[in-house]
Amino acid sequence: MKATEKLIITVKGSIDAKDKGLRKLYREYRTYKHELLPLVQDAVRSVVKDRAVIMMGQQKWNVAQNLERYVKNLPLHPMAFHNQSVWIEKTPQGYHLIHFKVKDEEPGAEAVCYTRIPGKYWSYVDQVCGKDNEGLGEVEVIEDVKYGRFNIHLTLRLPKPIPYETDTWVGVDVGWNHLAVSSIVSLDGVTDVSFHGAKYKTRVLQLKHLIKQKQRADRHVKAWKNRLQTTTKYAVGTTTKEIVEKAQRNKAGVALEKLNFRSHTKRYLIPRYKLMVAVKTLCERNGVPFTLVNAQYTSQTCNRCGHIAKGNRVGETFKCLRCGYTCNADYNASVNIAKEAISKGYMPLDKETEATSRGGGELSAPQVAPELDAIKTESRVDL
């Protein structure tokens, strides 16, 4: 992996309304808002006067009026600062001060504001402190009229951590009864099986059922859909942290099924694709190896004898028709995913070539490595 690769992170923070430096920043923001509307008006007029645009004169006038009214009444007008016009200072007490260059009578005038940043992002922000730091990208300032403060979005460009080498993998399978099931598989056997997100199942099902009832009664469901979206986001975030922390403790990589955006179906509690992207992002931030494997036959293959049959899985239970091995179906799939990751070896996702793929974007059929035969079956956990 190249050392020049960058990890892009967006950090959200806020500036309190009572901050002393906010007065200068607000004057700059107010000037920006006054200059924004004329720019939009000029752009709209250029389109209205363009004879190449086939539209009635009255229609062009209506479009111009509606667009100008929309921009004027926007509650949020993000003002962007280039990284050469802003820099972050860390005080001896550990606080973060943002210096904004503003237009003033005094040359080199700055608006210095204390910024509240969540503690989990402090380690990232500390890396971009100081003047002319290349790690700090664009900074957006947005007025929050409801709470009387300013929200800021910091774009950080940090060096991407190099993943460590490992031959142990955490196989993750997304199921119905549990949000995800993870198993640690190595050449010595299977250990540390975890079932994630069981406590969120009841809540998600209740909200989905309630939304259906509201829709049938032709009632307002927007608030309930927002609540379901928030619950799903929290469940995905919690499950992702548990999986990645488990991999870090055991110096293992994380392997998931290769899914596309359409993989979010009604049969699953959470969007599988969303969980995959969240795990991949967190692994990249922490330098944990991450790979995707072919999802074909992972739930129909016996992890003990390798027999593949559609009848092996019946609902939540997996029972091999050849050897009679019985266990939880999601657990069996997670072990097969980890085995597939061991067999193909670790390769960064951006370096996968077409040689590993088959028509339609599908990964090639799994190839079992000879080392997998040495996995001890005595250490397996029957669930």
Image (cartoon, rainbow, N blue to C red):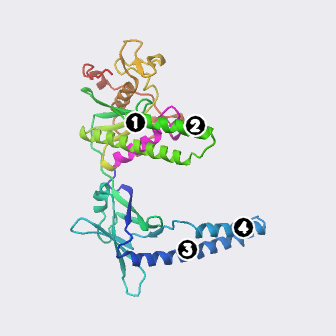
Three-letter residue code for mark 1: Leu
- Residue hosting label 2: 213
- Residue at image location 30% in from the left, 47% down from the top: 287
- Name the N-terminal-most of marks 2 and 1: 2
Q: Position of residue 58 (x, y in %)?
A: 77, 68
Work out how far the residue at label 3 is from the one at label 1, CA to CA, in angstroms.
46 Å
Whether tag 4 and tag 1 are in contact, CB under 8 A, the answer is no
The front one of 257 and 340 is: 257
Amino acid type for the residue under numbered disc 3: Leu
Give the CA separation, mark 2 to mark 1: 35 Å
Residue on which disc 3 sits: 36
Nearest to the eye among marks 4 and 1: give it. 4
Numbered badge on residue 62: 4
Above or below residue 145? Residue 209 is: above
Q: In this orientation, which residue lies closer to the viewer: 81 or 2?
A: 81
- Give the label on residue 256, or none: 1
Q: Earlier in the sequence, mark 4 or mark 3?
A: 3
Q: Total number of numbered labels? A: 4
Q: Which residues are magenta?
A: 260-284
Reply yes or no: does residue 268 show up in magenta: yes
The amino acid marked with disc number 4 is Asn
Which secondary structure, mark 3?
Answer: helix
Marks 3, 2: nearer the viewer: 2
Residues at badges 4 and 3 in contact (C-beta under 8 Å)? no
Callout 1: SS: strand
- Between the C-alphas of marks 4 and 3, the distance is 20 Å
Three-letter amino acid code at the position of disc 2: Gln
- State if disc 1 and disc 3 touch (CB < 8 Å): no
User: Which x, y percent locates residue 136?
Assistant: 36, 65
**Residue 131: where, in percent of width, then height?**
31, 72
Q: Kindly report the distance in space between the C-alpha atoms of the residues bearing marks 3 and 2.
A: 45 Å
